Image (tube, grey):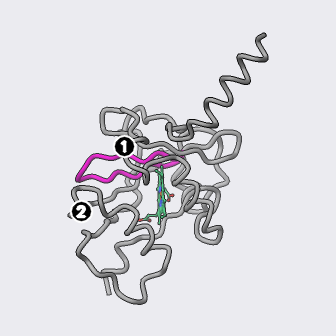
Amino acid sequence: MIKLFYLIFLSSILLADSYSLAHYIKNLKDMVLVKESMIPGKDVILPKDTPLFVQQTVSMYNWINNGKGTKLNIYVPKDKVELYKTHGPYPDGLTAIAIYEDQGIVFVTEHYEGEPIYGTYDRDGNDISEMHPSLNVSTCYSCHEGYADICINGTCSVPVIDVFKK
Ligand code: HEC
């Protein structure tokens, strides 16, 4: 009987893949700002030589803040800053967060048994992964695992802002 409950529990997790898997952060004060980035507004045309990966990320998330663009800051727990530079390998627990500042959307990457897991929250810690298809956990994997040469061990860290520095 217990086994059956476990199976039902497990399949409900697997089927409802839209719920956040990573937990909300406890305290931003324990984290270090490692990158200030941005998502340009919908009307911004990216330079032709912008890497495809960056273009796809921008077009996926430029609806945020009503399409007006947003600051995007990346924070890492104090004790993981060095690991972040080398893309891990990460121990279990909170790995990094990315905050879409102008709308207050918090992307969380955590590691569990060596694998990256993802989640999206508002600033109060409410799970918003069902609010928009691009916030769905399966969408996170499609990109963070799809670009194996850029996203290593679940973190990607390509500074979008560099595109505009030229
Ligand atoms: C279309 C591609 C794409 C998708 C989909 C995507 N990301 Fe990312 N993610 C990126 C890129 C590119 C960066 C690096 C941004 C930078 O350096 O400015 C990044 C960075 C991050 C970071 C900062 C840590 C790091 O370096 O990886 C977190 C946390 C994060 N993403 C979580 C998520 C979550 C949660 C989802 C799903 C809701 C998600 N991502 C979906 C491309 C994507």
Residue 43 horizontal/vertical position (percent): 23, 74
Choose the circle earlier in sequence order: 2 or 1: 2
Marks 2 and 1 close (CB-CB < 8 Å): no
- Does the stretch in magenta take in 36? no
Residue pointed to by mark 1: 131
Position of residue 65 in the picture relative to residue 161 (left or right) = left
As drawn, the label of residue 6 is: none
Question: Image point 25% across, 50% down: which residue?
Answer: 103
Position of residue 102 in the picture relative to residue 136 (left or right) = left
Residue 162 horizontal/vertical position (percent): 37, 77
Residue 164, placed above or below residue 141 = below
Q: CA distance from mark 2 to mark 1?
A: 16 Å
Main SS, magenta region, reads strand
Quadrant (top left, top right, bottom left, bottom right) of the C terminus: bottom left
Residue 105 horizontal/vertical position (percent): 33, 47
Amino acid type indicated by mark 1: Met
- Does the stretch in magenta take in 107? yes
Q: Residues within 10 Å of mark 1 (few under 14, many from 20)?
A: few
Position of residue 36 in the picture relative to residue 85 (left or right) = left
Q: Quadrant of residue 40?
A: bottom left
Q: Mark 2 near ligand 1 (CB under 8 Å)?
A: no
Q: Mark 1 near ligand 1 (CB under 8 Å)?
A: no
